[in-house]
Amino acid sequence: MIGLTLSLLLALSPAAVTEIPKNFLFTERAARVPLSQDDAAEQGYKISDRLTAPFELNPCRHRRAVDRGRTAARTITYWSTAPSRSAEQLVLYKSPRAARAALAGLRAEAGRCARKGDPSVPTLEIQWRTTKVKAGDEALGMGYRTRQAGNVDRTITGVVARRGSALIVYRTDDGDYDPGRLTKNARKMAVKVCGLPGVC
């Protein structure tokens, strides 16, 4: 009887999402619009569904994802010659527990690699920090400041939020460190991902 009940529950439980619908991310429609040759020389988007892509907030500079349990992912990055760079990323997991573990791993890495430099640029120092923000079930403001020869080079601001079995990441290198300005999109996406089966 117990085995039968468990089988029924498993049959009724939505399967983990293995594909993110087209144009699901907020920047995706703009990213899919072809640019003229002149515009493409000044700015552009890249869309990737690579499951092993590292997080756009990546304190320990991993070349590949080190978290486990991913079922789908999409990363959209934008660049311009301004210079400017921003990103929107959605990663889906097989369970809320796996997503929670991924967020905990990011939080730990921000502390462990808080002052990780770049071996290719010996004079460059990278200083990571985290702050509290509110979005989804739990969230973390993250970012870093780079210094070269004692002078501030640039500042990166980001937010990572968890909603159910999804992690949502936004980052930008425009302006000062202020994760709060990115929480609006994180909160909206935290609502939207609940429309995917099994995420919430």
Image (spheres, rainbow, N blue to C red):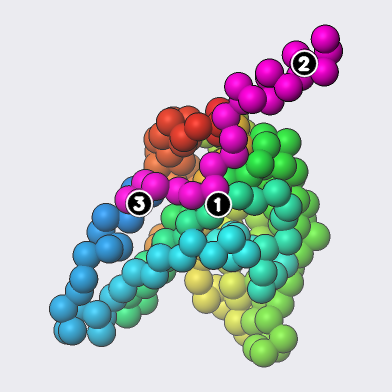
Q: Would you say residue 5 sits in the magenta stretch?
A: yes
Q: In this view, does 157 lie above or below 48?
A: above
The spot of residue 34 in percent (x, y) is: 21, 71
**Image check: 193 left or right of 8?**
left
Q: Residues within 10 Å of mark 3 (few under 14, many from 20)?
A: few
Please tell me whether mark 1 sits on a helix, a strand or a loop: strand
Q: Which of marks 3 and 2 is in front?
A: 2
Give the number of the disc on residue 26: none
Identity, as a three-letter code, of the amino acid under mark 1? Ala
Label ID, residue 22: 3
Quote the CA–CA distance across marks 1 and 3: 13 Å
Whichever of callouts 1 and 2 sits on the residue coming sooner in the sequence is: 2
User: In the image, which disc is placed on residue 72?
Assistant: 1
Q: Few, some or many C-alpha atoms within 10 Å of disc 1 (few <14, some 14-19, many ≥20)?
A: many
Q: Are marks 3 and 2 in contact (CB under 8 Å)?
A: no
| Position of residue 78 measured from the top left corner of the image (x, y, whole percent) | 37, 67
Q: Please report the residue visible at 18 percent of the width from the left and 84 percent of the height from the top.
A: 37
Q: Residue at label 2?
A: 4
Q: What residue type is labelled 2?
A: Leu
Q: Tell me the SS state at disc 2.
A: helix
The residues colored magenta run 1-24
Magenta run includes residue 191: no
Q: What residue type is labelled 3?
A: Lys
